[in-house]
Structures are given as C-alpha cells and as structure tokens.
C-alpha cells in the first residue's frame, strides 16, 4: 500500500476496543447524521481550490439527484415523488445559494462547509419570518439539499455497510447494530467511529467478528477523507491517517508479530482450563449471530454462555416467528451438543433498537423500558421467543436467561410466562426439556445487592459487567466523554462482584460472568479469585484467558483478591496487580 506523501499525517488516539493491526483505505460512511459544519480559515492561495471543492460537491449532488429521479421514473409507484426531486434540483441551481456561498468563501476566507452553513442560516432566518406554512415547509427542502452538499463536501458515502465492495476501513460517526450485523469480514477490515465506549454494542461486535476497531475518536469523520491510507491499531487505540512509508513498515512488522501471537495461543486450545492447583474454570463463548459459532468452537469454547438474541430481530421490519426462533436455537443446540447454550431472552432498548419494534422516544433509554421490562409488558412477543427456546431445548442442552433483572418480582413474573409457555406446549404435545435451567443476569446494582435472595429463585446467575458498571458508576456505556470512568477495578465494582459471587457460592448456585471483563486476563484473574467459575467471552479472548488461568494458582488469586478489596482506588488496584504479577497478563505480542 502506497502512502500519499502530499497529504498531512494525522495521529489520533481513541479507545481501542478490538485488538489487531490493519493498514487500509478509508471508506467514510454516511450514517444519516450530518456533521455540523466546521470552521477553517484559509490562506489566500487556497481560495480557488476551495471554490472548486464546493463546485464538485454541487455537481456530485446534482448527479445523485438525477440518478434518484431516473430510478423513480422507472418505478410506477415512484412517479409522484419526481416533483420533489425536481424542486431539489432547482434549489441546487439557485444562483443566490451558490453565488453567496462563493462570495463568503472569497471574502471571509473560510472553508466551503462553513460558508454554505452561513448562507443557509441567513436563508432559514428569512423563512422563519414568513407567515405562510407552505413556504415555511419549503425551507426544509433547502435544508435537505444543503445537507446533501455538506455530506458530499466531506466525501462521505451513502451506501450501507453490506454494499461495500472492496476491503476498507469503515469510518462513521456511529454504527447501529443493524450496520454491524451486516459487516462481512474481508470487506470491512476495521472500523473507526467518533462515538462509543469499550462496552458499546459496536465494540462488542468488533471483538466478536475479530475486526480491529477504535471508537470514541470524536472527530475521525472530519479528519479522514475517502481513499486515505489509514493504520489502525485496535489494541492501543492509535489511528494514523496518511502515514509515511517508514511508519507503514513499522506497523507491518507489528502486524506479523500479532499474527504470530494469535497462532501461538492455539497451543492452549486442547489443554484443560485449570489453575496450577487444579481449580477447573469453564470458558464459554458470547455470540450475536450464527456465523460466530464456528470460530467459538475453533477457539475451544465449552458452550455458549451468552447468546444475544436481539440480533435475530435486526435488519427486518417484522418480528421473528416462533418457527424462526426454533430453527436458530435448534441449530445452535445441535452444534454445541453435548455442551450447553445459554439463550438470553430479548434485550432490546438502550443502545440496541430494533426495526420491528417501535420503542418510542425515551429521554433515558438505558433506564427505560429495556429488556425484561419490555418483554413483561409485551407478553406475546416474549412468549413467542420462550416457546421457541423451549421447543429447541428438546434438541440439546439449552438454558434460558433473563436480562436486566432489578428484583425478585421480575424473576417470578418472567418464570410465570415461561410456565405458561410450557403448559401450552404440553397441551399441544410438543416435546421440550421439562427441567430447563433458568438463569438471570446480574447487571443492575439492586439485583446484585439482593443476590442472596435472587439465587434462591434460579438455577444459575451470570454477571453482566458491562451494564453493571454502567449502572453502578453512572456512566453511559456508549458515551465517549465518560469512557475514562469505565474502571472495572473500581472498589465499588469489585465489592459488588464479590457480594454476588459469595452469595451464589454459599447457595451452591453456578455463578458466571459474561460481560467484557471476563475476556480480559487482568480482570479474569480477579474473577477467579472471587470464586467465579464460568467466564463467557468472544472467541479470541478464550485462549488468552486460558493461558492466564493455567499460569496462576487459585490460592494466589484468592490472596490477591483479599488484598485488593481493601484498596481505595482503581489505579492503586491496577498498580498492585501489575506489581504482583509482572508481565503475566499483559499482551505478549506488544513487548
Ligand atoms: C452486560 O451487560 O454485561 C452484558 C453481557 O450484556 P450486554 O452487553 O448485551 O448488555
Ligand atoms: Mg447487559
């Protein structure tokens, strides 16, 4: 890959959420959100080039609209919309809009985006004063067309992820679960986003698909242009746009080292996951889509510890039928047999919205009608899924798990719906596992605090540390501005996890962790010391965590936990662990 020596080198630091190094070409995606125009003062010598850039964006917009118009003309149902496109085309030719923008570029020596934005503001203020609804509505058309030109000025593409035809580094402000679910490894080499944190769905999906990614870059959509050469280091969160040849060489070498590290880990694949003093830990896989099953098995997953079934509901306008549920879970049960698969019921809401369900607008979606709350309010949707899970349980070892439990009432209500589904199936003569194990996720502090009572209601519990951190530390998991507060070593988090693990162990109920903490060796060590015996994670992390478990003793891990529970800050905990176990859990390939 040749670097463009004329372009400015830009170094950016974000949150590395999925390991690996990629060198490739940028593909800027339009995800529907138009960036606010940014201000940039120009040198006199740059003015002509800026006007050319503006004219090119106008021409691109013109071509796009004509293409849309042609499509509408070919489609009988589209004809009625042609007049709107014609109106937009007329606005694009509007001399005032064009001439005024060029004038502002020249006289105020500002970039085209800012000039166009300034002109648009004036036009909008004028329209706001007009006392005529129809004319005021027309101002929306102008806004719409100006946004199109702004998007073209930044060079962003309008195609969805699935239509990317050449291997690229996808750059977007944000990506929806629907976008990430369509990502095909090979075409999407990596992705970079302005927003997001370590446990946002895009980060989780990147790890699952083993696509190196950096999120929370804040302004990468403004700094990179289509076709730029970009280096992504998903481990450190470093992004270099337009790197020099020598920097590319350095990263190529690191890329090779990383690949060797990945291969070396396979040495652990068939070795038992036990500590040096013989404590057996079960490493399971987290999955979102069926395509991940092979990779999880290849990496030695001993079952599925978390199937995020909301992905079955994505990229469609309707809801999955009972038969579709049965097919998906049955296929999974058969593939994993004799190992278990834990199917988590629909966890809609928060940063996961679904086409077939209108959630309405909530001011605080993370605290709103999410997950089990939604399901208990929409029992038919819930029961359809439960019937699917139950029917598939006749074909393998399936367990059911309820997300976002905040108290005992919710568990009992969810179990009651499950009982209803069982009774229906029985009456219909359909087979299912009568003793199907029931579990809940502990991811809300209220449930964690009463873990001793929760464990009396269920067969197993699984700690969802992503949400547990979000709710106990009051940090929005998708907000890059508070990502620095995501501290799994925070004493409060450690105490909560200990409380939950102690309660489960005392009651003899299986306790696992399926949040992202489980897949990071330094945190897995702590979870081990707290007495957690099931860890569920993405494919790549399985072997890294197994390597760690096999190199420590349970007694040592317990001793470490005894000490850290009395340490006051996350930084001090980290420091203590690093000093205790130098080099044990850090990424080998990086040294
Ligand atoms: C969690 O919250 O830790 C979890 C595993 O669930 P999700 O990331 O899907 O919310
Ligand atoms: Mg969760």
Image (cartoon, grey):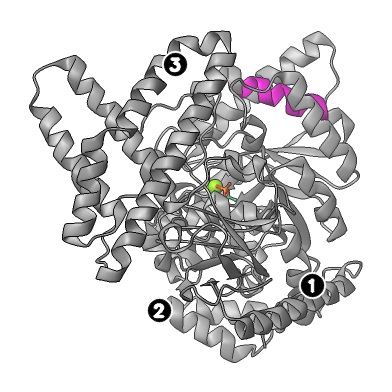
First of labels 3, 2 by sequence position: 3
State the image quarter where residue 369 is shown: top left
In the image, residue 175 lies at what x, y percent?
A: 52, 47
Tag of residue 568: 2
Quarter of the picture holding the N terminus: bottom right
In the image, residue 228 lies at what x, y percent?
A: 55, 64
Q: How many labels were placed on the picture?
A: 3
First of labels 2, 1 by sequence position: 1
Q: Is residue 367 visible?
A: no
Q: Residue at x 62, y 75 (%)?
A: 522
Disc 1 marks which residue?
A: 262
Disc 3 marks which residue?
A: 82
Q: Is residue 235 visible?
A: yes
Decide: marks 2, 1 in contact (CB < 8 A)? no
State the image quarter where residue 554 is shown: bottom right
Depth check, front residue: 383 or 314: 314
**Distance from the alpha carbon under mark 1 to that under mark 3:** 55 Å
Residues drawn in magenta: 382-392
Q: Residue at x 39, y 15 (%)?
A: 83
Dot 2: within a 10 Å radius of its alpha carbon, few (fewer than 14), some, or many (20 or more) residues?
few
Q: Is residue 336 left or right of residue 157?
A: right
**Distance from the alpha carbon under mark 3 to that under mark 2:** 66 Å
Q: Is residue 89 left or right of residue 208?
A: left
State the image quarter where residue 331 is shown: top right
**Distance from the alpha carbon under mark 2 to that under mark 1:** 36 Å
- Considering the numbered disc 2 on the image, is that residue within a helix, a strand or a loop? loop
Dot 1: within a 10 Å radius of its alpha carbon, few (fewer than 14), some, or many (20 or more) residues?
some
- Considering the numbered disc 3 on the image, is that residue within a helix, a strand or a loop? helix
Depth check, front residue: 535 or 496: 535
């Amino acid at each position: 890959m040749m670097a463009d020596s004329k372009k400015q080198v830009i170094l950016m630091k974000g949150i590395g959420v999925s390991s690996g190094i990629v060198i490739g070409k940028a593909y800027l995606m339009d995800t529907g959100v138009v960036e606010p125009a940014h201000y940039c003062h120009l040198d006199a010598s740059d003015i002509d080039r800026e006007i050319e850039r503006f004219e090119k964006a106008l021409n691109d917009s013109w071509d796009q609209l004509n293409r849309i118009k042609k499509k509408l003309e070919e489609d009988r149902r589209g004809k009625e919309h042609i007049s709107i496109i014609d109106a937009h085309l007329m606005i694009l030719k509007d001399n005032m809009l064009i001439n005024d923008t060029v004038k502002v570029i020249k006289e105020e020596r500002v970039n085209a985006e800012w000039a166009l934005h300034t002109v648009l503001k004036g036009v909008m203020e004028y329209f706001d004063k007009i006392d005529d609804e129809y004319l005021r509505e027309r101002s929306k058309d102008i806004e719409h067309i100006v946004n199109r030109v702004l998007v073209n000025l930044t060079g962003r593409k309008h195609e969805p992820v699935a239509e990317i035809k050449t291997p690229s580094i996808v750059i977007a402000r944000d990506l929806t679960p629907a976008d990430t679910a369509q990502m095909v490894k090979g075409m999407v080499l990596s992705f970079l986003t302005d927003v997001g944190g370590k446990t946002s769905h895009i980060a989780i999906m990147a790890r699952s698909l083993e696509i190196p990614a950096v999120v929370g870059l804040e302004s990468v959509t403004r700094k990179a242009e289509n076709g730029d050469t970009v280096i992504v280091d998903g481990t450190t969160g470093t992004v270099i746009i337009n790197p020099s040849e020598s920097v590319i060489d350095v990263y190529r070498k690191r890329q090779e080292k990383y690949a060797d590290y990945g291969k070396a880990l396979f040495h652990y694949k068939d070795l038992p996951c036990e500590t040096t003093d013989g404590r057996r830990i079960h490493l399971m896989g987290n999955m979102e889509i069926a395509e991940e099953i092979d990779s999880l098995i290849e990496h030695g997953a001993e079952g599925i510890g978390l199937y995020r079934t909301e992905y079955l509901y994505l990229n469609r306008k309707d809801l999955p039928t009972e038969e579709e549920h049965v097919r998906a879970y049955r296929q999974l049960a058969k593939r994993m047999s004799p190992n278990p698969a834990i199917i988590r019921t629909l966890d809609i809401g928060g940063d996961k919205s679904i086409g077939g369900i209108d959630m309405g607008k909530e001011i605080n979606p993370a605290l709103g009608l999410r997950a089990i709350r939604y399901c208990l309010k929409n029992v038919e949707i819930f029961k359809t899924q439960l019937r699917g899970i139950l029917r598939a349980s006749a074909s393998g070892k399936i367990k059911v798990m309820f997300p976002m439990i905040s108290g005992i009432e919710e568990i009992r209500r969810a179990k009651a719906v499950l009982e209803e589904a069982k009774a229906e199936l029985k009456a219909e003569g359909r087979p299912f596992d009568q003793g199907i194990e029931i579990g809940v996720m502990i991811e809300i502090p209220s449930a964690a605090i009463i873990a001793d009572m929760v464990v009396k209601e269920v067969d197993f519990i699984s700690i969802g540390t992503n949400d547990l951190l979000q709710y106990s530390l009051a940090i929005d998991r998708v907000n890059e501005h508070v990502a620095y507060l995501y501290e799994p070593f925070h004493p409060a988090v450690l105490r909560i996890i200990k409380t939950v693990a102690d309660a489960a162990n005392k009651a003899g109920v299986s306790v696992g962790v399926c949040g992202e903490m489980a897949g990071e060796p330094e945190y897995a060590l702590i979870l081990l010391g707290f007495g957690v015996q099931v860890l569920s994670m993405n494919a790549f992390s399985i072997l890294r965590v197994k390597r760690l478990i096999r190199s420590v003793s349970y007694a040592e891990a317990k001793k470490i936990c005894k000490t850290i529970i009395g340490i006051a800050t996350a930084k001090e905990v980290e420091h203590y662990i690093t000093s205790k176990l130098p080099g044990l859990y850090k990424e080998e390939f990086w040294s």
